[in-house]
Image (tube, helix red, strand yellow):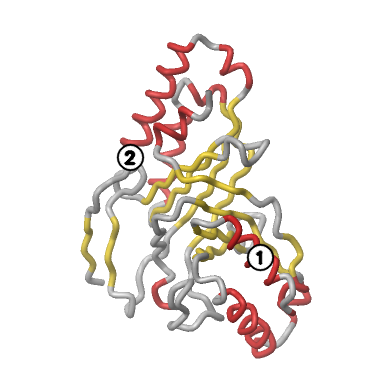
């Protein structure tokens, strides 16, 4: 497969080299991890200089590891009680992801961190979304995540009922067509759907990008009225993440 790597300007340590592909040809799918961390109260009792040293060390590790993968950082301080920050890491290589989190575990600050939630998933072509979907991207290009610049990210794991999978494919497609139509009414909300079958406890992980929390809230409420929604077994916990570069994310810890 012919591909080229294009390096775009970095904002903090957020994004590594971005690969541009011929979306009409088969290509490697991406592994995705959403890792949520909470800092222990004991860390905030350390001397300010030591906390600053540990923040700087972790920032350096994330900067070193960001090359060759997509790495986005978010703060949840003020939006969630059991998580302070989130790392959204995407790579075609499992070993590269493992290297990132192994390096993180070797830092001094990691001794005060608890990974309160973690979701592993993979990109996959949608069987429901047609190539002209303006909000979620076409089925052919969903093998490569391309997050935008919106400041809010809403993430949750998702599981359908067994009854859903027992339905004929045409019936599921009919219900999803309505679901997609409702979603299109909120163009400010971009969805990134990844798949976890056999990789983790959930079936999907969905991540919605937007600049408006109100638009996202209204979109989710509207989707509750769809027929497909009645086949949802689980879609919690839900996380409100605020985009921040590494320095700002760590500074918010205290």
Rendered residue at 32%/44% (across/down) = 11
Q: Which residue occupies the foreground of this view, 8 or 209?
A: 209
Q: Is residue 125 left or right of residue 162?
A: left
Closer to us: 104 or 73: 73
- Which residue in the protein does label 2 denote? 12
231 left or right of 204?
Answer: right
Mark 2 Cα shell of 10 Å, populated few (<14), some (14-19), many (≥20) = some
Q: CA distance from mark 1 to mark 2?
A: 31 Å
In the image, which is nearer the foreground, mark 1 or mark 2? 1
Q: Residue at x 39, y 53 (%)?
A: 91
Where does the image place residue 247, in percent across and percent down from the top left?
Answer: 39, 32
- Per the rendering, the mark at residue 220 is 1
Left or right of 133, for residue 76: right
Residue occupying the point 65% across, 65% down: 218
Up-down relation of residue 196 to residue 239 (above or below): below
Q: Is residue 31 above or below residue 166?
A: above
For marks 1 and 2, the one nearer the N-term is: 2
Q: Work out which residue is located at the far bottom of the displayed protein and give it.
A: 170
Is 212 placed above or below 135 here? above
Quadrant of the image occupied by residue 236: bottom right
């Amino acid at each position: 497969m012919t591909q080229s790597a294009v390096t775009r300007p970095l904002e903090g340590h957020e994004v590594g080299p971005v690969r541009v592909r011929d979306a009409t040809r088969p290509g490697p799918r991406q592994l995705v991890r959403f890792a949520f961390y909470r800092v222990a109260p004991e860390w905030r009792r350390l001397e300010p200089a030591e906390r600053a040293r540990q923040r700087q060390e972790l920032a350096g590790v994330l900067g070193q590891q960001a090359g060759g993968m997509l790495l986005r950082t978010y703060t949840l301080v003020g939006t969630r009680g059991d998580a302070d920050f989130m790392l959204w890491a995407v790579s075609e290589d499992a070993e590269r992801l493992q290297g990132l989190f192994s390096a993180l575990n070797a830092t001094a600050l990691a001794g005060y961190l608890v990974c309160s939630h973690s979701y592993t998933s993979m990109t996959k072509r949608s069987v429901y979304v047609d190539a002209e979907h303006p909000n979620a991207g076409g089925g052919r290009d969903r093998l490569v995540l391309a997050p935008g610049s919106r400041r809010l990210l809403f993430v949750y794991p998702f599981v359908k009922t067994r009854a859903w999978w027992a339905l004929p494919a045409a019936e599921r497609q009919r219900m999803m067509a309505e679901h997609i139509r409702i979603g299109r009414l909120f163009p400010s909300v971009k969805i990134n759907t990844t798949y976890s079958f056999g990789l983790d406890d959930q079936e999907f992980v969905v991540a919605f990008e937007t600049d408006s929390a109100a638009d996202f809230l209204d979109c989710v409420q509207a989707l509750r009225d769809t027929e497909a929604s009645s086949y949802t077994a689980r879609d919690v916990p839900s996380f409100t993440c605020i985009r921040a570069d590494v320095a700002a994310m760590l500074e918010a810890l205290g």
